[in-house]
Image (cartoon, helix red, strand yellow):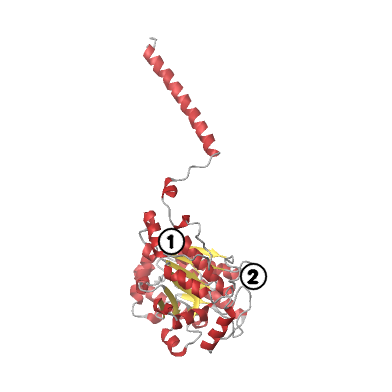
Amino acid sequence: MPKRSIAASLGSALFRLGSGALVVFTFVYTFWSAFTTPPTPTLAASLRNFYDDPNLSYALGSSPPMKGWNEKRQEWLKQHPSFAPGAPTRIVMVTGSQPGPCKNPIGDHLPLKLFKNKVDYCRRHGIDIFYNNALLHPQMFSFWAKTAAVRAAMLAHPEAEWIWWVDSDAAFTDMDFLPPLPRYHRHNMVVHGWAHLLKEKHTWTGINAGVFLLRNSQWALDFLKVWASMGPQSPDYAKWGQTLSSVFKDKIFPESDDQSGLIYLYLKEKWGEKIYVEDEYYFEGYWLDIVPTIENVTARYTEIERNVAALRRRHAEKVSEGYGRVWEEQLKGRGGLRRPFVTHFTGCQPCSGDHNRMYSGESCSDAMTKALTFADNQVLRNYGFMHTDLKDPSTANPLPFDFPA
């Protein structure tokens, strides 16, 4: 065989040398990377915002208070342009439960199912959810704990326009419906109630504070501070209890509470101008009014599906909102047919078991099971199954094609 040229031999040697050097470099780089911390990204080092303020506090009642929050949020969004699309309608849901285990034997089971219900709803609509079971203010216990959690969520999520508080004992019973946010464009808070009843009779039950939407704004920060000042951490707590009891003659206990405090601020202070009292749908409905109607609602929806082939079509869960819009077209002008949006089991106290004496613990747990199974059927439809008995959530059967034609 002919001998290779000197140039060819030299090229081969250089190739082997280069390949060996590359192997050594790769090994050394991998070893070094495993034991060193990656450098801080340029973005975090060069763009400063409200998070860099050493005086920033997430705590309720912090000093100095947050000022200029609207402008700080907008500046943050400019620094993070990927969050700008959809920002005006972005929602973060906040809920939670007590720090310790439940006293009621079924108490840990029911709150878990109620949380699953919220997670299902949020997943279908692309909503982030924060579940808190720590007292973020040690003196703000029980129903007052929500104010501290909501404030912290506002600062943790500047990308969200709305913070949506939902009590642990509230369930979504219409998994397709979304609150009509454009209706609330001039308001900073949305609650369920009856505005005319509130203004005429000053009733303690005119608004329930268990579910509310709060715009992520300076107004909301200021409102939370004033609202929380009626709570047990305030030196005026006892005084507020006397004031609220004198205003609301139907108030059933003397201590200051979040619900009567909210209604007082709506009626007596400037805050009412920016609070929207929703009464056109069940933004938050009383379970005793809702649960007995579930079978009738199911029958009406089934009849609509039989007549509208588009609603029977199988589809991916990710596109459920599109089918929800078809439902809206079918339900327009037929308010009595609509599924109740949120069912609140006020007074049931599934964790402690200290339910209102108006009804038994069994009636509460049975109603929760029925409502949650009703909601779960709306979720399982996308997975090809359905509970045939609302009292038996453990069993689900596969659905035939084109059900319920």
The answer to whether residue 63 of the structure is visible from this angle is yes
Q: In front: 42, or 371?
A: 42
Q: Residue at x 51, y 35 (%)?
A: 30
Q: Residues within 10 Å of mark 1 (few under 14, many from 20)?
A: many
Residue pictured at 35% horizontal, 59% vertical: 85
Q: Quadrant of the N terminus?
A: top left
| N-term-proximal mark, 1 vs 2 | 2
Q: Circle 1 is placed at which residue position?
A: 158
**Residue at screen point 49% across, 42% down:** 38
Q: Amino acid at mark 2?
A: Cys
Q: Would residue 107 be found to the left or right of residue 65 on screen?
A: right
Q: Quadrant of the C terminus?
A: bottom left
Q: Quadrant location of residue 144? A: bottom right
316, above or below 262, in the image: above
Nearest to viewer (mark 1 / mark 2): 1
- In the rendering, which numbered label is found on residue 102? 2
Q: Nearer the viewer, residue 221 or 11?
A: 221
Element type at marker 2? loop
Q: Amino acid at mark 1?
A: Pro
Examine the image and state in which quarter residue 72 appears. Answer: bottom left
Tag 1 secondary structure: loop
Image spot of residue 349 (x, y percent):
59, 76
Q: Residue 359: percent from the left, percent from the top?
A: 59, 84
Q: Position of residue 312 (x, y in %)?
A: 38, 68
